[in-house]
Amino acid sequence: MLVALAVLIPIISFMIGVLLNFEIRKVFARAQYRLGPLLTMYSDLRGLLGFTRILQPLYDILKLSYKETLIPKSANKMLFTSSPWISLILAVAASYFISYGGLTILANIELSLIFLTYLIVGVSLFWIIGASASSSPWGAIGVRREAELLFSIEVALLSSIFSAALLANTLSVQGIVNAQLKLYPYILLNPLAAITFMIALLGKLQLKPFDIPDAEVEIVAGPFTEYSGKLLALLLASKYFLTAIMTGLFVNIFLGGGQILPPTNSLNLAVNFIVFLILCIAVAFIASLIHAVAPRFRVDQGFKWVITRLWPLAFASLALSIVFKSMGVL
């Protein structure tokens, strides 16, 4: 059973990431009065292209995997080629620490929240390392922006995560889910932490207004400018994993993990997973709307806004959790 779950969970996480990235692209396109990837294909093209393009993000990865991988002569070849692999491995490892409606392997161990946060940071860190090894001026600018964003956003993200951990009095992801089942979702108890996490999620996924590192009209593709072929496919795959992990973590620590039935049998697990997936889609929809309507920050604007607005909100959410614990509300 454990071997089957070890194989199944990364596949589930990756496909959720594919679905959510389709949603982000679709909502963004419709907000600009474009069609975007088609949910239902035109009837006269279904024989050639299939019924739907909901798997378009997956097709993009498959297309890149067949293209030639070009490595700049001046790049540090070892770091440039190994960083996408390491970021993907870390993203796959992080997927084991999410509870998919009660379906999990490592989310129920103590300190799983600590391991998960390290792995999430590691994914972004190796994006930075790989891009810095490319020797591209556009990559260098993107790296600097990504590093600034990583430093500022992570503080707020960790504060919101540990606000929920304080309320549940545990560092286990599944433990936080179980604590909410006994009371009510923490989005109601500490909405400040949920808002902080949602804003930080935009930064981690490089969505507007925090798509500063890969601003296409300014620095081509930022950190990923020199990547192509299989290496770019690996980076996209790690980003899809990160999308599923971040939205799944929000559902876990603020929405009760989607568990509406005790995960004691296969039917209950299936129902819980469907609820979990619906909640992930809802979280991604909110992020997509913000991405569609928000303008991009300049580098200085984004950093200043996070320091002056998001950090105080994050610290306030942490203080609110401490107050609830000290008053014995929980």
Image: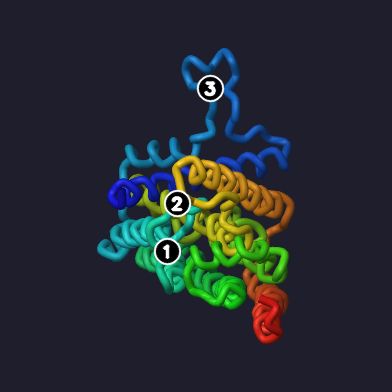
Q: CA distance from mark 2 to mark 3?
A: 30 Å
* Secondary structure beneath label 2: loop
Residue 8 is situated, as x and y percent measured from the top left of the image, at 36, 45
Say if 161 sits above or below 312 in the image.
above
Q: How many marks?
A: 3
**Is 295 on the left-hand or right-hand side of 211?**
right
**Viewport quadrant of the C terminus:** bottom right
Residue 246 is situated, as x and y percent measured from the top left of the image, at 53, 59
Say if 176 sits above or below 99 in the image.
below
**Is 200 on the left-hand or right-hand side of 99?**
right
Residue 40 is situated, as x and y percent measured from the top left of the image, at 60, 25
User: Could you tell me if residue 133 is visible in this image?
Assistant: yes
Mark 3 sits on what residue?
A: 51
Say if 211 sits above or below 236 in the image.
below
Q: Which amino acid, mark 2?
A: Leu
* Secondary structure beneath label 3: loop
Where on the picture, by quarter, is residue 154? bottom right
Residue sitting nearer the eye, 131 or 205: 205
Where on the picture, by quarter, is residue 106? bottom left
Q: Which mark is residue 103?
A: 2
Say if 2 sits above or below 133 in the image.
above
Q: Residue at x 68, y 82 (%)?
A: 328
Q: Which mark is residue 175?
A: none
Q: Earlier in the sequence, mark 3 or mark 1?
A: 3
Mark 1 sits on what residue?
A: 123
